[in-house]
Image (cartoon, rainbow, N blue to C red):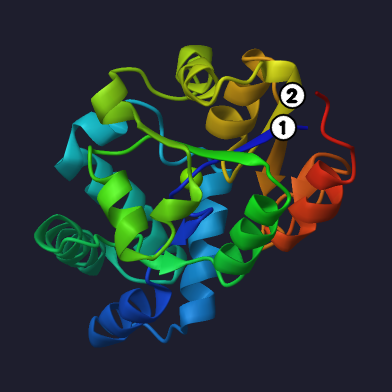
Amino acid sequence: MRAILFDAGNTLLHLDYPWLAALARRLGARASADDLGRATAEVSRMGWPAPKMQRRPTEFFEGYFGAIAEAIGLGAAAQRTFARAVEAEHLGTREGMWRRAAPDASAVLATLQARSLLLGVVSNSDGRVEEQLAAAGLRNAFGTVVDSYVARVEKPDPRIFRLALDRLGVGAADACYVGDLLGVDVEGARAAGLVAYLYDPWDVHPELREGRVRSLTALLSLAVAKEPSS
Ligand SMILES: [Mg+2]
């Protein structure tokens, strides 16, 4: 293994669950940050966010964050208010809504860099993911950051993974990928010829016996155990 590619949203960069929980409580839900994390993972398991939705922001935010609000027990009107508030916060701030680095992200990336692995990001985003990785202190770990909005191709299209591999100068057989969505991340990366792992910190895919990690740290033993081919 010579390279590891990462998804950004809900993998390297988590939603700001404490902020979302505070918003939900203002709207009448009894929800903790953990509740928001679990609800988001459940909504993701049901197939959100669907590819191509990110080109239509309001529809995306209403659908995705409306479903998260529903999952924590908010009613229809509060779901819309929740979604609009999240959209305003995401679009109105430099760091956006996915602004909490995964708890082990910095340590894992530093370990992988120390082992001379090439690192990249492949994200379905809105043109701002590189800036958001920088705001979270993670950007410098990566040799390339591919943002679907900039690349004009998005996951699960295998071409976006190949673009990242080409930039790193690595073949698919020497790389793996980790992301939180089965249909977008795992299926797309496998179609491009990479070994792919599902990132599942909330344990919403217990049926998967292989190819699943509960933390980024777990990736170290899986992806780095093999000696780099040269
Ligand atoms: Mg993701």
Residue drawn at 27 percent across, 35 percent down: 54
**Residue of label 1:** 2
Cα–Cα span, label 1 and label 2: 5 Å
Tell me the residue at 26%/41% (across/down): 60
Between 67 and 126, the residue placed more toward the observer is 126
Q: In which quadrant of the rendered image does the C terminus lie?
A: top right
Q: Mark 2 vs ligand 1: CB under 8 Å?
A: no
Expressed as whole percent of the image width and height from the top left, the position of residue 2 reads 72, 32
Instruction: Say what secondary structure mark 2 lies in.
Output: helix
**Split into 4 quadrants, where in the image is the N terminus?**
top right
Q: Residues within 10 Å of mark 1 (few under 14, many from 20)?
A: many
User: Is 199 situated left or right of 6 in this image?
Assistant: right
* 18, above or below 60, in the image: below
Question: Residue sitting at 45 percent across and 41 percent down?
Answer: 48
Residue 29 spot, x, y in % from top left? 36, 82
Q: Is residue 41 above or below residue 188?
A: below
Q: Earlier in the sequence, mark 1 or mark 2?
A: 1
Q: Position of residue 39 (x, y in %)?
A: 51, 64
Q: Position of residue 12 (x, y in %)?
A: 51, 55
Viewed as shown, does residue 43 lie left or right of 172? left
Residue 51 against residue 21 in the figure, above or below: above
In front of the other: 90 or 84: 90
Quadrant of res 13: bottom left
Depth check, front residue: 117 or 25:
117
Name the residue tied to disc 2.
174
